[in-house]
Amino acid sequence: MPNPLVSIPGLGKVKGVVVEEQPKVVKFLNVPYATVPERWRPSIRAQSWQGVRDCTQQGPMCHQPKSGNPLVSMAAGDDDDEGEGHIKNAKPPMFDEETCLNLNIFVPKDHLEHAQSLLPVMVWIHGGGFKDGGNGLSLYDASNLVARSIEVGRPVIVVTINYRLNFFGFLACKELIEDMQQDPRFKDATMYDKCVGNWGIKDQRLAFEWVRDHIVVFGGHPTNVTAFGESAGAVSIAYHMVIPQHHGLFQRAIMQSGAATTMGTGRAAVEGQRFFDLLCRQFKLTHLSGKEKLEVLRKMPAAQLASVGDNGKVGMFSPTVDPSELRSPLSSVPQDTSFLPVDIRQILHDPNAYDPNIEAVMLGDCRDEGIMFVPELGAASMKRWPKFVSRYCPPGQEPEFARLYGTPTKDAEALQISAQVLSDSIFLYPIYATSRALLKTNTEGPTAQRRHKPVEIRRFHFDRPLQIVEDMGMGMGAHHAVELPFVFGSSQFAQLMTDEERELSRRLQLIWISFAWNETQVPFLRSITNLLPADIGTATKEAIVFTEQCTVDQGLVERLSEAKLKFWETYERWILEKRQQPARARL
């Protein structure tokens, strides 16, 4: 059949292509939703174009260093090994700073041709520590996910988005603050618009607004949107739910391995400044004034700038939260400046901050989340153990920390214990805290009064390692992001999965699709019981578990004991106290 054409009012025509392996699915790739007019400035909505835009090929992603995630590396064609675990014909992605703000749209073909009703829309936000990733990776090809939705009689439209990353999307420092304040174009701008360091989060907002404004011509329902994301993508969802200007972007959310405090909050004067100073040292700019440094860095080729993050030279990035970006009703939060940091932990527990349009949220984790982060954040040896404890144990809590997690006597034990601590502190506790906070919005504050119905909370756990990664001898278990091949079931990864894994993928996809349809009384969803406030932290309700044996079972909502939950609550308060003290950017 000829390539399908869709006319987007106010923008132009786009030409898609029928998916070769899934002829019931049409995809439109590299559809622009915004452009980047200048480095370290807000993106602007995409302009109209003349003629028919060819949307049959993948578009560029944001420039980025190589990923440390084995699945992402495989999808990007970074692995040089042509043997076991190698993805055949994996195309290395393209990169471009100005045109990376594009989205891919996967639509049921029959619906595109003969739409009788508007379909639920699922919008994917990729992870990668706000440092790497993109919709051009084969890992996020949604063709098979949409095909599965057609097969089960619940067709959906899936949109996968790009946003600016690393130095391009999340850099904040005193030089950029001064630069923005002195820009005459922003003289009368709002504090929100003047805020620096959150370019990537604001890009995402424009992507969701594009979906709201234009998805109807593809047959999608503009107010029946499920945001789903993993790691930094899930963290992004949490931020969207508490930023007032971002309310109403979606109605449901699936948060995979990430919650509000998973990655904390960057401060322009501390974490952000370290990244900027690193760039200046790397390119020998330390002798220049702040204005001159920015002039040089703005003109520098994007690939050269991104390469500073290669070989683990920089860690994860994060949004920079200040009063111009996140306004809390808490009187202790400063409201009158654009550079004083406000930790999201001060927002998380406030039920008034949440989007009242949210109807349902499903949150979950992988069994061995922490193992991937041991090299950067953990203690792979006894030598690193004291520093690790000082970072994750509040003063005076050392005996309780040892009682809960044990004390290692050799390197292997240090690695194992630190991996578990990272799982609990970065993933399990933040998911618990976010679940509890969302449930408060049903009963406390103005958000409860604005709701037309209570928000529903559901939980899941993923325990299945990917066999091909296990066969590589990496010893990572059900590691962070391991569920991604199961969620998308992309053809390039499906060919590497066992028959049992492919069947588990089909069952998981049905759950995600049914959630987007707002259906719960279907196979595999009956075990996901809507939680009540009293259920959080108890065993009275059960979550869905994707088991190591590739079955779907029931398990405890919380895997942390009451004592561990109490410990991490103490840790959270300690972190807040530390961050309220004067700090400097250490070189």
Image: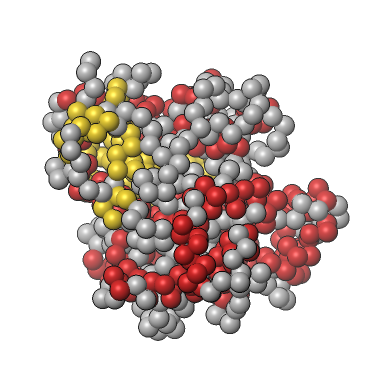
370 over 584 or under it: above or below: above
Q: Nearer the viewer, residue 9 or 236?
A: 9
Please say if 260 is above or below 65.
Answer: below
Which quadrant would residue 482 be assigned to in this image? top right
Q: Is residue 195 left or right of residue 303?
A: left
Could you tell me which residue is drawn at 83 percent across and 51 percent down?
411
On the rendered image, what quadrant is the C terminus found in? bottom right
Q: Nearest the camera: 204 or 147?
A: 204
Is residue 385 visible in this depiction of the protein?
yes
**Is residue 514 toward the left or the right of residue 556 in the image?**
left
* Residue farthest to the top, as pictured: 1
Location of the N terminus (image quadrant): top left
The relative height of residue 543 versus residue 243 in the rendered view (above or below) is above
Give the residue displayed 27% in from the left and 30% down from the top: 54
- In the image, residue 236 lies at what x, y percent? 42, 55
Q: Position of residue 81 (x, y in %)?
A: 66, 26
Q: Is residue 255 visible?
A: no
